[in-house]
Image: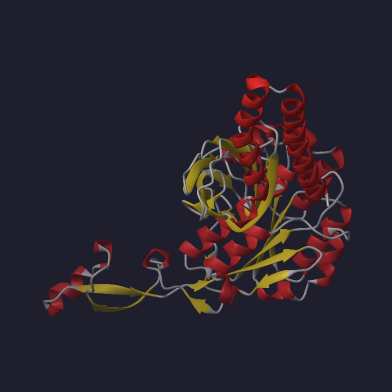
Amino acid sequence: MNGSLRMIGNVMFAIFLIIVLFSYAMFQGGFVSWFLFFSFLPIFLYLIGFLIYPIKQWKVSREFSHPIIEAGDGVTATIKIERSFPFPIYYCIIEEVIPQSLMKIDSRKDKYHYMNQPYQLNVERRIKKVTFPILKRVFQFSYSIQQVPRGEHHLRYIRVRTSDIFGFVKKEHVFEVSDDIIAYPNKHSLQVTERFSSYEQGSVSSQSHSLTNTNVAVGIREYAPGDRFSWIDWKQTARKNTVMTKEFEQEKSTDILVVHDNCYFEGMSPLAYEATVEVCLSLMSVFQKRDTQVGFLSIGEESVYFPPEQGNSYSPINQKLTRIQPTGERPFSIRIKEEIKRMDQGNFVIFITTHIDDFLKRSIQQLKQRNKRVAVIFIKSETLISNGEQQQIQQLRYANIPVQVLTEKQLMKSPIEVGIG
């Protein structure tokens, strides 16, 4: 409606100008009057042509250099406009309509400087370019978005504004051009100070030579490529006149379940939450490199569960952690009791959370009483940890439940030291 009214107003304005000049020439007469009228006539014809010229029929496209990136990276995009008829246009303003999800930056580890002031990372991104197409059929421009935050960012619209050379008639159209930027979470280097394999737990044999226990030899066999030099049995080698190595009892892997707190609560720190996502991904990557069976459980309004036999599939979990946002109204401690059956799938349960209260402490202690190995990774700004949370942490430690506190100081280190045993 507004566009139609604007069009009618522009047409009326152009007609009014030509009527005024024609009336002036008719009543005034003389060379000067008719010279002004005929001089303005080409401009009038151009204005009429510009008014009926349909810019909404332009073909507008967007192309990204790397639509799939890691949070903190930059992406370059090229907007291309094609038109079938090269009507003369003096200038054109092309504007990318930026979604709200891109109105913040991710500076990787440096962002944790502002863990207690996350608003410092909010930005106002504006992408606008003035081009001068004149008679070009195809024109384009490129722009870049730096420090893209984690998530799926949907770019849907491109706004185009143009006008005649005198500014009498203005046109605007919003083109729907759908493209997505996918920014995976950052994966940090972790130094985990716990050995997760044993002979008593788990049901799946480790396939890695680095996990083979070299203290319990159960036999000998011929040397095979990949065997260590220290495994050679020199006595049997001399007796059999061929290189023999010791054969060791193969370890069983401990099934681990990583439980992520995805419950929203008032006053939660968005940067602390981002740290839980990144630590989850990094921790699971460490376990997968050790050939350890690891499952993943994210508890929010709706829970997402990957059992240990699927936890080693990196891609689905990475995709889930890319999209995930805190949801729900019920606290994490209440939701844990509803999901307690799934936690029986792991011999070692690791909780990653940004909030500890008395109910959560009791839930973790009850899980400990079910003969489970339990650890907690608590992430929060050092200045925001309350006295009550300090007390809950101490009580969990007194109950022989390891609690690793990660503040901005630890998160900015490389590697991040995580002690959960």
Quarter of the image where one finds residue 165 = top right
Q: Nearer the viewer, residue 88 or 272?
A: 88
357 vs 70, left or right, is right
Vertical placement of 197 versus 389: above or below?
below
Which residue is rendered at x = 47% and y = 63% of the image? 290
Q: Is residue 201 at least partly visible in the picture?
A: no
Residue 206 percent location from the top left of the image:
45, 73
Viewer-side residue, 329 vs 180:
180
Image coords of residue 331 (percent x, y):
86, 58
Q: Nearer the viewer, residue 134 or 223?
A: 134
Q: How many marks?
A: 0
State the residue lying farthest toward the left: 241
Q: Position of residue 255 (x, y in %)?
A: 59, 71
Instruction: From this view, report whether residue 106 is shown above or below residue 265.
Output: above
Which residue is painted at 75% across and 43% down in the image? 11
**218 left or right of 77?**
left
On the rendered image, what quadrant is the C terminus found in?
A: bottom right
Residue 234 visible to the viewer: yes
Quarter of image, res 365: bottom right
Tell me what residue is drawn at x 70 percent, y 33 percent. 168
